[in-house]
Image (cartoon, rainbow, N blue to C red):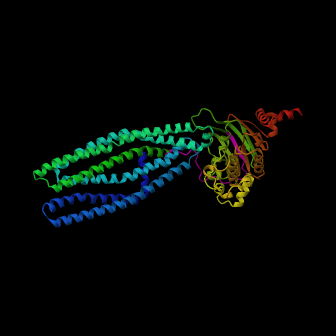
Amino acid sequence: MKDLKFILSYLKYYKKDLFITLALVVVETFFELIIPFLMSDIIDKGIEMGDTKQIWISGSLIVACALISLITGHFYAVSNARLVTKFSYRLRGDVFEKIQTYSFANIDHFESASLITRVTNDVQIMQNTLAGGLRPICRSPIMLLMGVGLSFAMAPSIAWVFLCAIPVLGTILFVVVRKTAPKYSVIQKSIDNVNLVVRENINAIRTVKSYVREEHEKEKFNKANTKVMDVTKFTFKVAQLNQPSFQLVMYAVTVLILYLGSIAIHKSTLGVGTLSALLSYILQVLNSLMMVSNVFLLVNRSFASSSRICEIFREVPTIKNNPNGLKNITNGAIDFNNVSFKYKENSIEYVLSDINLHIAGGKSVGILGGTGSAKSTLVALILRLYDVTKGEVLIDGQNVKDYDLKYLRDNISIVLQNNVLFSGTVRDNLKWGNKNATDEQIYDALKKSCADEFIDRLPGGLDYDLGQGGVNVSGGQKQRLCIARALLKNPKIIIFDDSTSACDMETERKILTNIRNLHGLTNIIIAQRITSVMGADMIIIIDNGKIQDIGNHEELLSRNEIYQELYETQLGGVVNAADSQ
């Protein structure tokens, strides 16, 4: 309930629209309730008394009330649509903005498919709840009080039937809500799973087809889809009992009123017009109660969605920005002082342990290590994608936590192993590095990344549409475009995380030579190929999260067994040839 209140508190930003919407409902309901009362006058005072004037007066008033009710109902629909769209727009925007503040550690707490569902489907459920629930919630109390009040005023000997129906309807609603409430959370989690399967399948569609695993993927999707269907079917089946149960009570009350009313008419203690009005009121009141019961079902489902949305808001970003942080990176020198790191606080083992390292500004550094040796984790600490568990990381002698986070990341470029391009043109993607970059600057970056070799061959050149995720270019081309994008930032530090692996060795050599020739740029290269780091000023060997050795190519080749083994394996026994000379 607390989560739902928090979400609904967003209505405070649109008080004017909310007030207008509720006022229109009140006016519409008031004039609807007058109509049966006037109808009774037409029958009792007009038709039975033969008073034509009374028929015209009451009839004209009924038409006027109906028109006012119709007009206010129309303007309510317009106002309500404006209110709920603004509400969902702001809520969805705030949820997305909150996610943008997350560090990698925060994002690790959620599955990406779940975050997508929460931003889209769960917010949509809250919007539907507000859109479908505002009118009945406001209308029903007025309808109930005025309808029952007018009924007692006209025929107290019969109106007591209302009081018998209400507890029966309340019991039905309680049973339905109690049965369905736990299921809505299961439904949303099942939708998360469906989104996960679809997302994985689309992202890996080439792998799926190359391994001829379409049938396996279909089975996996059907399993997830069936779970959604089964839970939804049971929930909706129980929820649908609500409406026929309410209708049964409504018709039973109608029959009872007709029975009691016919007796009263026979005794001349009740007029036909009054009975007609009474029946109209009971239909209006019970219909409004039935609508309220449907709103309760909507609200019941919104409990699960509001809780899932609030989980995003409650997540505390693990990385805090210093609003008055430093903005003075000049040399790009990097120091790791007694750094240890683990992804979760309760983990027993550290991913990185006792890292002490100095990288001089403007130097070229290579990092080698086996799979899972924490090479990528090491460089992630420089950008504060994660914060260290122990120790400190310094840039130009200042702790990275003391820098303004935006400034820090603006001055460090990283080209990841899994390169990401966005839908749009080549120019659109490259301007992520510098939104004000000229074509001359773009071509200079393309030349340094050796991407100029293929850009001019693309239809439209810089205006070539890369498609979603850059599907219209090869893996090597994608890597070179990502490198060009990183260079356009004019960073002080650039990091390549195995980001030339899809390029041939000659192209890789050209790219790395161009990067190392850039004056004042600290460049760090994580690689699997020893040729990628041979020309670096310093090479770091990492093994099991610890620095195993540091040196240049000649030093490591003469003393380090891991480096010698890599060199011999990849370059075909050159070490032995060198030793024999």
Q: Residue lying at the far left in this picture: please name it.
A: 267
Q: Residue drawn at (63%, 46%), measured in percent from left and top? A: 384
The correct choice, above or below, for 342 with respect to 291 in the image is above
Q: Quadrant of residue 77?
A: bottom left
**Viewer can see residue 19:** no
Residue 532 locus on image (x, y percent): 76, 43
What is the magenta segment's predominant secondary structure? loop
Q: Is residue 360 left or right of residue 470?
A: right
Residue 399 locus on image (x, y percent): 66, 46
Q: Nearer the viewer, residue 447 or 87?
A: 447
**Viewer can see residue 563:** yes
Q: Is residue 499 left or right of residue 171?
A: right
Q: Quadrant of residue 184?
A: top left
Residue 536 locus on image (x, y percent): 78, 44
Q: Residue drawn at (37%, 51%), measured in percent from left and top? A: 133
The correct choice, above or below, for 78 with respect to 540 in the image is below
Q: Residue drawn at (44%, 45%), measured in percent from left and top? A: 305
Q: Nearer the viewer, residue 119 or 479?
A: 479
Q: Residue drawn at (81%, 38%), measured in percent from left and top? A: 555
Residue 200 locus on image (x, y percent): 57, 42
Q: Is residue 579 left or right of residue 411?
A: right
Q: Residue lying at the far bottom in this picture: please name it.
A: 53
Quadrant containing the C terminus is top right
- Whether residue 82 appears in magenta in the rendering, the answer is no
What stretch of residues is rendered in magenta?
312-338
Q: Nearer the viewer, residue 36 or 258?
A: 258
Number of numbered callouts drawn: 0
Q: Residue lying at the far right in this picture: please name it.
A: 581
Quadrant containing the N terminus is top left
Q: Quadrant of residue 416?
A: top right
